[in-house]
Image (cartoon, rainbow, N blue to C red):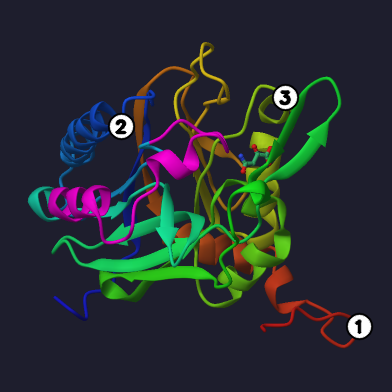
Amino acid sequence: MANRVINKIRIALIQLAVTSNKDNNLKHAMSMISQAAMKSRADSADSITPLVVLPECFNSPYGTQYFSEYAEEIPGKTTQMLSQIAKEEKIYLIGGSIPEKREGKLYNTATVYNPQGEMLLKYSKCHLFDIDIPGKIRFQESEVLSPGNQLGMFEMSGGLKIGLGICYDIRFPELSLLLARKGCKLLVFPGAFNMTTGPAHWELLQRGRALDNQSYIAACSPARDTKATYTAWGHSSVVDPWGDVIIKAEETEAIICTDIDLDRVDSVRQQIPVQTQKRNDIYQLKDC
Ligand SMILES: NC(=O)CC(=O)C(=O)O
C-alpha cells in the first residue's frame, strides 16, 4: 500500500457557521466533520481517504478582541478533539485555525491530522492581516498576534505533498510559489475574507495563485453571519490548475466536496510549461 501511486484526492470544505459560544462551535464542528467524511465517501467507487478542511478561526469569532479569551495551547482541548475525530472518521483533517497561546504570545494557528489521529503539521499564519480601508474596514491582527516564521506543508500517503497557508497569506505569491516549488500540487487556505475584500479579491486571488503555480487551490471560509462583528464573505471554493473554479459554496453553511486530479496538474504544466521557463538568470525566488 505504501508504494501505491495516488493521483486523486477527494477534498471536502466545511463552510462552518461559527458563533461566540466556543463549546457549541466545537460540538458543531465535530458533527460537520463526520458529515463531511460521510459525504466524501458517498458515491465513491474507489477508496480514497478524504481530506476534510475547516475554516480560519473556527472555534472563536474572528476579531482581535476575542483572540486572548478563546486562545488555547496546542495540544489542548480543541486539537485533542480534532485528533480524535480524524482517527474516528479515518480522514486527513486540516483543522482550520484557532487562536493559539504559546510562550506568552498569541498566534493564528492551523493543525493537520492523519487518519491515525497524529498531528502532521502545526502552521502559524505568517502574514498578519493588517489593513485599513477608510470607511470600510480596519483590521490589525498584529495588535495581538505574532506571526509564524515557517512554511506549512505536509504529506499524505503516497507521498502527496499539500501546501498550507492561512487567509491573508494567499496575497503573497512568493509563499505559494515556494510551496509549489517544493512539490505541492494542492495549496489549501483556511480563510475569512470580509464583505469588502471578499467580493473584490477572494476568487481573483485563488485563480491567480492557481495560474501562477498551475496547482489546485482550495479556500475554506466560515459561513456568513451578518450579525457578527466581522462578517465573513463565505464562497469557499476549489480552483483547478487551469484557473477554473470547479466548485463553490454560496454564503450560508455548507459542505462542498470534489475530486482533485493530480494528473491534471502535470498535463497543464506540460501544455504551458512556465514552470521550466523561469528566467532564474534575471530573477530568483529565494528559500530562506
Ligand atoms: N482575514 C484575512 O486574513 C485576510 C482578508 O480578509 C483579506 O486579505 O482580505
| Residue 70 drawn in magenta | yes
Tell me the mark number nearer the camera, choosing from 1 and 2.
Answer: 2
Q: Is mark 2 within 8 Å of ligand 1?
A: no
Which amino acid, mark 2?
Lys
Q: Is disc 1 placed on a helix, strand or loop?
A: loop
C-alpha separation, residue under disc 2 versus residue under disc 3: 26 Å
- Work out how far the residue at label 1 is from the one at label 2, CA to CA, in angstroms: 51 Å
In the image, 186: left or right of 84?
A: right
Please provide percent x and percent y for residue 27.
19, 31
What percent of the width, then of the height, locates residue 187?
51, 57
Residue 120 point in image, percent of width and height? 30, 69
| Mark sitting earlier along the chain (2/3) | 2
Location of residue 282 with respect to 64 vertically, above or below: below
Q: How many marks?
A: 3
What separation in Å lies between label 3 and label 1 (alpha carbons)? 37 Å
Which residue is painted at 38% across and 23% down in the image?
A: 19
Dot 1, crowdedness within 10 Å: few (<14), some or many (≥20)?
Answer: few
| Residue 164, percent from left and from top | 49, 60
In the displayed orientation, state which residue is furthest to the left. 88
Q: Earlier in the sequence, mark 3 or mark 1?
A: 3
| Mark 3 sits near ligand 1, with its Cβ under 8 Å away | yes
Rendered image quadrant of residue 177: bottom right
Give the mark nearest the N terminus, 1 or 2.
2
Considering every residue shown, the one lying at the far bottom of the view is: 281
| Tag 2 and tag 3, C-beta contact below 8 Å | no
Q: Which residue is at a point 72% across and 24% down the rendered structure image?
A: 196
Residue pointed to by mark 2: 22
The magenta span reads 60-86
Q: Which residue is mark 3?
A: 196
- In the rendered image, which residue does mark 1 sit on? 282
